[in-house]
Amino acid sequence: MPPFLRYLVPLFLAAAAAAATSATATFVLEEATIESIHRAFADGELTSRGLVELYLHRIESLDPTLHAVVELDADGALAAADRADAALLLGSAALPPLHGIPVLIKDNIAAAGGLNATAGSLALVGSRPARDAGVVERLRSAGAVILGTASLSEWCNFRAPGVPAGWSPRGGQGLNPYVPSATTCSSSSGSAIAAAANMVAVTIGTETDGSIMCPSSFNSVVGIKPTVGLTSRAGVIIISPRMDTVGPICRTVSDAVNVLEAIVGYDPRDAEATRMASQYIPEGGYRQFLNIDGLRGKRIGILRKDFFRFPQGSIQEKVFGKHFDTMSQLGAILVDNLEIPSMKVINDAVQSGERALMLAEFKLSLNSYLSELATTPVRSLSEIIDFNNKHPVEERTAEFGQSYLVQSEATNGIGPTEERAITKLNKLCNEGLENIVQVNRLDAIVAPGASAHSLLAIGGYPAVTVPAGYTSDGVPFAICFGGLKGSEPKLIEISYSFEQATKVRRPPPVLQRCAI
Ligand SMILES: *[C@@H]1O[C@H](CO)[C@@H](O)[C@H](O)[C@H]1NC(C)=O
């Protein structure tokens, strides 16, 4: 069978299977939002159990092709859905914001009760967390149903250079549902694929440097990378406490904002960062910034030379030109042709100090995570490296080895090298984003796709990516709005207003025919 057909056949089978399970008259699973789901609950058209079953079925049909999911906790999810349905029947009390909503969490986030958080590695299969990750606790208390784990690039793309995006020994090779030959990008690939392909409405990703923004961009979904510390990293396998953040990947800004609101807040298990960032949480939450007129009066910086370098006459050049016109018409003040002098250094992880810091921080973070597990087959990075040596996965692991893991193991905490790196990164932040925002009195900067990932990563700055277009080959690309720490309210106003004015997202073309 030609490769193209091999890809199509399972998708058509999925479409047929999905149509056959159509359970309700008017609820549409395709592109369902938290709001449309809640409406269907309230109208008695759908139950949380029914929704979990629909998504399980769709995952069963599509995932053998797309590889977005690592594990499902069907029993746990159905039990939680039944509790949600029972609460709805009891009536009266206000239902929590994510009431009965199934969620896939990235495979580096621990959930008590059966799911294995493994960061894609076989070494961690069978590890048991003592309790939920901080964000999972918050998801559950907001009413969410934890359905399973989403695939990722192994170790959040920190195994070695050259590891294929979206690949892990546990999840296999994730596939871009729009264009199978296109990248899924790294590292929250499964979260983005699953949201894009309507395997669920809500997924959770994590980002060190690009891992929410980039897969969101390539899979035509909305990603929020919150200010570092706004969401707890407790119980999450992270690379860098300075840069790592947990955030939603959904299909709409509104859904992502609802999830963000549910997962932010102080966590004594990630005390320092979450206490610092708590000051940024607005009274009344984030949903108030879903403002259709949110672009009006916003000063948005275009780092033209740094990020908008497209071939003349290319689709991207035209599309972003049109988007800028739309934003101006909606009252945004575009401050064009800005430039950050040190951008070359910022984009070079070795020169900026980012790599050196990540290598040292990863070992500390991982060993600390492992030490908190109730049971685990491995207790240290060194044991994981041994495991990989003893269990080579497929022939391909021989190609790229595990050099980041090995280099990380060779570090020894935060010493003089790392202190120098921190000083340099701080300087790059001050001379970079902080300076350009201050001098030009910006509310946000804009960049295509994930191109500003390092600029935003090194200072723990937030970003929102929104679908912006498709290349002539059909590969999605996003627009990204970033800003200083705590600028989520402005970024939400801008991105929601942009999304509502442009409505670029469409479901993957083949999957579109899945009528449920
Ligand atoms: C987690 O791993 C264990 C050990 O391999 C396995 O028995 C269990 O089924 C896994 N959990 C899920 C939800 O797949």
Image (cartoon, helix red, strand yellow):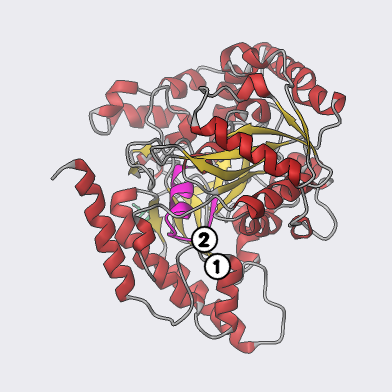
Picture quadrant of ligand 1: bottom left
Quadrant for residue 385, please give it.
Answer: top left
* Badge 1 element: loop
Image point (55%, 18%), residue name: 411
- Residue numbers of the magenta segment: 189-204
User: Residue 253's x, y, as percent?
Assistant: 63, 54
The circle drawn on residue 201 is 2
* Badge 2 element: loop
Quadrant for residue 2, please give it.
Answer: top left
Q: Nearer the viewer, residue 428 or 113?
A: 428
Q: Amino acid at mark 2?
A: Ala
Residue 367 shows in this picture: no
Q: Amino acid at mark 1?
A: Ile
The mark nearer the N terminus, 2 or 1, is: 1
> In the image, is 320 to the left or to the right of 278?
left
Q: Is residue 79 above or below residue 376?
A: below
Q: Magenta stretch containing residue 345, yes or no?
A: no
